[in-house]
Amino acid sequence: MEFHPSQIPIVKTYEVKDVKTASESAIDMIGIGFEGQRGGFKVIMPKEEKLAKRIGFTVTTELNYMLRKKDQERNLRYWTYHHDEKNYAIVLISGNVFDSLGL
């Protein structure tokens, strides 16, 4: 059976409609933490290509910057996929946590 990102257990889901909310969700993810979890985070965003690219770039860049700033492991894995007719989704998870799930 093939792996799909929707199979990853989700700790928290964020509905992101703009870049400001994307930045706020990244800050919240850092506050919750990636390593101590048994799953990942999901960001749901509108299927407007330019907006979705900006949101995805903002989330991943902010996460990498803040993890480096706090001197934490930056081994993150993420996938973007079609969530439904109106939304894309990004699933983000620590590489170590993903390996431990055995997917």
Image (cartoon, rainbow, N blue to C red):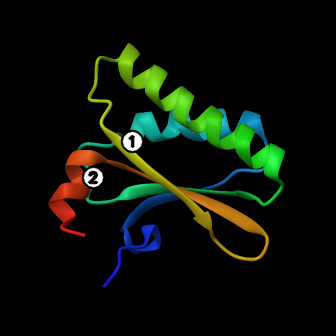
The residue under the point 64% across, 33% down is 58
**Residue type marked 1:** Ile
Task: Say if 97 sits above or below 21 in the image.
Answer: below
Query: Which image quarter is the C terminus in?
Result: bottom left
**Dot 2 lies on which element?**
loop
Q: Quadrant of residue 90?
A: bottom right
The residue under the point 81% across, 45% down is 51
| Residue position for label 2 | 37
Marks 2 and 1 in Cβ contact (< 8 Å): yes
Q: Can you give x and y, in whole percent of width and height, for residue 98 in the image?
A: 26, 56
**Dot 1 lies on which element?**
helix
Task: Say if 58 sits above or below 53 in the image.
Answer: above
Q: Quadrant of residue 25?
A: top right
Disc on the earlier residue, 2 or 1: 1
Picture disc at residue 40: none
Q: Can you give x and y, in whole percent of width and height, for residue 28 in the image?
A: 51, 38
